[in-house]
Image (cartoon, helix red, strand yellow):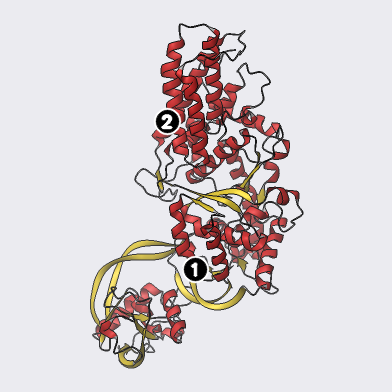
Amino acid sequence: MELPKAYNPKETEDRIYKLWEESGFFNPDNLPGDRKEKFVAAIAPPNITGELHIGHTLEHTLQDIIFRMKRMQGYKTLWIPGTDHAGIAAQNVVEKQLIKEGTSRHELGREKFLERMWEWKEKYGSIILDQFKKLGLSLDWTRTKFTMDPDYQKAVETAFKHYHDKGWIYQGERVINWCVRCATSISDLEVNYVPEKTKLYYIKYGPFTLATVRPETKLGDTALAVHPSDERYKDYVGKEIEIDSVNNNLAPDAPIEGKKIKIKIVADESVDPEFGTGIIKVTPAHDVTDFEIAQHHNLSLVQIIDERGKMNENAGKRYQGLKTTQARERIVEDLQALGLIEKIEDYEHNIGRCDRCNTVIEPLPSKQWFLKMKELAAMTKEAIDSKKVKIHPERWTEPIRRWLDNIRDWNISRQLWWGHKIPIEGEEDVLDTWFSSALWPFATLGWPDTNKSDYQNCYPTEYITNARDIIYLWIVRMIFSGIELTGEVPFRDVFVHATVTNKEGKRMSKSLGTGINPLELIEKYGADALRFGLAYQTTDLQDLRFGEDTIMMGKKFANKVWNISRYVLMKLGDDYAFQNKLSDHDIVRRSKEVGEQITNSITKYQFGEAAHTLYDFTWHDFADKFIEETKDKEDQATKDSLFHILVTSLKLLHPFMPFITEEIYSKLPVSDKKLLLVEEWPYSQ
């Protein structure tokens, strides 16, 4: 049987995927043979905010490589697909759509707006799942989950009640991160700190001069703070000093007047003595660190900025109603008029912006629901320290420990309409989307119904993988949620894969013009080329600088595999039957070594190393050397060796390039042939 002269992925991939689906082998209950050991994981569920990006493609490709190998090794494999409702992110994109239509969620009302959200979910949730198929992911579609399915909602309510009954969920007023545009609180982990150029203002405070980037919050100052070991100010700690201020109750057009006020000086470890002059103003209502200083020293709290990002009545008539940037300009002018500005310098520092809409975050005092983290953080550290959960690469272990040591109580409430409503009567807020996502490894298996066969047979799962950006948002929260709610760690391994950037090292973003649509790459090169190219570039480095040239290499490699297979089939002829009379050629021994290396590399999450080994063996050892040596040979040993090496190569390549290998394998004269998807892996670990 001959292969066509050229491989055409467009004519092959959809047909092959349909063949896999019809076989039922993505479902562990249908797998052939006696499979005693399980291998289970749930896919990291993409948000329903649009289409997959190249980062998703890398992550899911690497996960599929593991699952395809494990399936061929005889494991009872279950890989659960699904999508996340995405809370603030999804609501944000639908609200933008409404703005284009000339309306808003408030004009629609809650009920109609939620109908639009579900319409969005049905459209884009399906698109994402179809894209999974284009990539060749071997997911069990019969177990597809969505984080707002009815049974999943039951899991969320059960988790909330568990924490609430233990007294770990409480309602309190604290300074939180507030997004003015999204009109909701967001967690510390959903704030992007972006370096921006601004001004550093040196303001006279009585006998001192101190530096600040936010002179407008001077109107809410209730203390000054220094570091306890700073000798410059030790004689002032605990005392009150009289300082010059501005009469902020004047009308906007009134002449500027000064006034005297008294303010206390406190010592606190959080103060950086190297910043500015080593003394800072404390505005407890508008800075998270200042709020904590106020808690330590029993300072009063004066809110001067409202939830719209404008100065309120406490800022006085002269500033009330101004946006914070406008108020900054006015108060600087006023302080200069009173001779209270010593100097102004150019300055660059990190500005907190909303992860979803990029609006500058405004720290505000707000009444929210919080989850106590002290005991949950301790149990997470114990699980990591005892290796019940292993982190790969291990260098991520220490940053996780440090984060847990400094963790604050988790603000779990959001002032949104889309999401899991907090299950308390009269409460209109929804839960942080990560609260529900943290239940993913066990809620997808039927928890809290612990009698469900999937939960009993498949939990805990084997591993999870993600980029570094959501280690704390998701990975850590899944660990403590699993331990606390099920009594077991939710997975045994965490693999932190590289973050995909463009060639210049900039993050991938459609809005910045640096985004790449993986579907376009599949259309251009084929899914196998994309998968192999991404795996080939994967190393232990934190960033993967994506280049299309590597995908082109993947396409050329796919064509090489096709041409090798064409040669072998022609060499074997129509009447060939394998007799296992292998030659004593070095490549036979080498193929065994390569199989062991690849198995070991994939098991250790060293995907790039495995891909390089496969590439070198297939192209150089097999094609360049052995095939060249066989062109004038027709003996059985040569044919059996060609056949053996080809079959072995296809099996080892299958996790990386599943479509082309399945297509070629279907043409080989293999006895008792099954789909390559479920054939036996060449070598054990």
Q: Is residue 204 above or below residue 495?
A: below
Instruction: Evaluate whether residue 204 shows in this view.
Output: no
Per the rendering, the mark at residue 128 is none
To which quarter of the image does residue 378 belong? bottom right
Label 1's element? loop
Q: Is residue 298 above or below residue 43?
A: below
Seen at 59% across and 62% down, the residue is 480
174 or 214, which is in the foreground?
Answer: 174
Callout 2 environment at 10 Å: few (<14), some (14 to 19), or many (20+)?
Answer: some
275 or 457, which is in the foreground?
Answer: 457
Question: How far from the left and from the top, in percent, is residue 452?
Answer: 75, 52
The residue tagged 2 is 552
Comparing labels 2 and 1, the label whose residue is closer to the camera = 1
95 or 571, which is in the foreground?
Answer: 571
Q: CA distance from mark 2 to mark 1?
A: 45 Å
Per the rendering, the mark at residue 407 is 1
Q: Would residue 434 be found to the left or right of residue 271 on screen?
A: right
Q: Tag 2: residue type?
A: Met
Question: How far from the left and from the top, in percent, is residue 535?
Answer: 47, 37
Question: How far from the left and from the top, in percent, is residue 67?
Answer: 59, 39
Q: Tag 1: residue type?
A: Ile
Q: Would residue 579 be found to the left or right of residue 634 on screen?
A: right
583 or 85, which is in the foreground?
Answer: 583
Label 2's element? helix
Q: Would residue 50 be found to the left or right of residue 21 on screen?
A: left
Q: Is residue 666 above or below residue 21?
A: above
Instruction: Evaluate whether residue 430 shows in this view.
Output: yes
| Mark 2 or 1, nearer chain start | 1
Seen at 72% across and 59% down, the residue is 448
Question: How far from the left and from the top, in percent, is residue 676?
Answer: 62, 27
Seen at 46% across and 20% down, the residue is 587
Pick the quarter of the image with the N terminus: top right
